Image (cartoon, grey):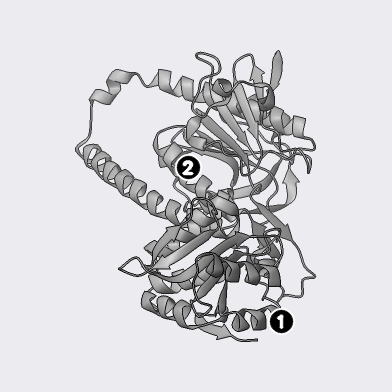
Amino acid sequence: MSSKVRRSKDLTPSQVRIGGTDREGVPRFLAYALPRGKDDDKAVIHELDDLDLHDVPLRHADSFLAFDGVVVLAGVFEKITIREFDGLDPPDVRCATSDLDRREREFYTLTNRGQPFVFLVQPILHRLGYDTLKDHSDLFRRVISSLPLEWDLLSDTAANLQSRIPEFRSFVERYGAASVWFQPSYNYKGEATIIAGAERQFFGFEIRQRVFFLPCHKPQTHDEAVQMAADAARAVIAYRRRMSEEMPEWAAEFQFTAEVELRDALNRNRKEAVRLEGELDAYTKRKGALCFRSEPLVDVVVSMLASVFGLRIESEEQCVEDARVLDMDDNIIAVVEIKGISGSFTRQHVNQVDSHRERLKLPSATPALLIMNTKMAADSLAEKDEAPHPDIIKKAVQDNVLLVRTLDLLRYADLVESGTIAKDNFRTTILSESGWLRVEDNAITVLKE
């Protein structure tokens, strides 16, 4: 088998555009978030004889929906740190939540279209002591939790596996060391086909020729992971091709009454899924307030101030971080500064808001709002949740400025949309208060020091 590799930095824009075709008639599979070096964030296309394998890192812009199929290792979205376990202290589980939410929606859209999605099931922790880990921190966990079956990590790796499907024999012989077992309480004869199994357990299976769970050892190098993903994609392509040939197209002309009803229900559900995906995307974009700076941050914050809190906002073109709150007669009733920084509020930031008032020839009594995405370099939400220094809060009170972290802004928006508090309360607060607006445990306070 020959192959050549093209790095995306060497490609023309037309060659890497999402949805484009690199080689006519050659399947395009996405190998998503394969293990790689810490500083290796390059997207690579591996041109194989029979396959284009797009090898991209976590959080890459490419959509699952732009490819003929996707291969993902179980556990790539999460990082689990086991603490000293005494029966009470749970593990520290962190995950790429925003990317994971997006990928979960793309998974269901892709498979509903009938395209294949492959999970390479390497060792993945399911329990710690008597506690089962939550199912939200990885795509494998989320998908498998929706199926009526049991699964767990084996105490010892099962290395002598046999493939029950000929197309997967080579993959199983080469990589098939099972670390996870699946309990066949699920009625797999009706919907799923076992790929690799033993007498009373199975270690790999597929559902409707769309979702594949393949047992594998943990790849030791990036190159091995690439080869593993390519071999899995080949096996899936060959298996689906054979199954398609065994079921000729004319067989679909016969339809059961219940089948027609089910297809109608599926179409209705797809429309509802599209609507729900749109609403979820709106919330995902709002979370950009915790990550963005400059114009992208301003766009997110201004949108929330208008759509959630009902304020009339006007932004300046020359100074993108400046904005104003207007009344119904277009009079300025408050000035707004919006910034994203790696640290926290400083005296200089508060002074800039006061300069904004002076530039507009407004009296110092005019309310001023300093909204900042602080601690942009934080590694967790807990680390980001750092209070402003008391001296800066006092300075804000003296200069008639209200400090608002974007974290507090999102929490306030959540309280408004859940009906816990009226949106008019926000308007009243920003026009009458100075200091630090803190939102914590569903309670809203303005601290003066």
Residue furthest to the left:
257
Q: Position of residue 394 (x, y in %)?
A: 66, 83
- Amino acid found under the numbered disc labelled 2: Glu
Quadrant of residue 219 in the image?
A: top right
Q: Residue 391's mark?
A: 1
Nearer the observer, 397 or 161: 397
In this rendering, position of residue 411 left or right of residue 417 = right
Q: CA distance from mark 1 to mark 2?
A: 47 Å
Instruction: Identify the element where label 2 is drawn.
Output: helix
Q: Position of residue 25 (x, y in %)?
A: 50, 14
> Circle 2 sits on which residue?
106
In this rendering, position of residue 375 left or right of residue 366 = right
> Residue at 30% of width from left, 45% of height from top?
271
> Residue at 65% of width from left, 31% of height from top?
55
> Where does the N terminus fall, quadrant-wise?
top right
Q: Position of residue 43 (x, y in %)?
A: 67, 32
Q: Is residue 170 above or below residue 40?
A: above
Nearer the observer, 145 or 201: 145
Can the viewer see residue 346 in this picture?
no
Q: Residue 56's mark?
A: none
- Amino acid found under the numbered disc labelled 1: Asp
> Where does the C terminus fall, quadrant-wise?
bottom right
Nearer the observer, 445 or 24: 445
Mark 1 vs mark 2: give the one in front. Answer: 1
Can the viewer see residue 272 in this picture?
yes
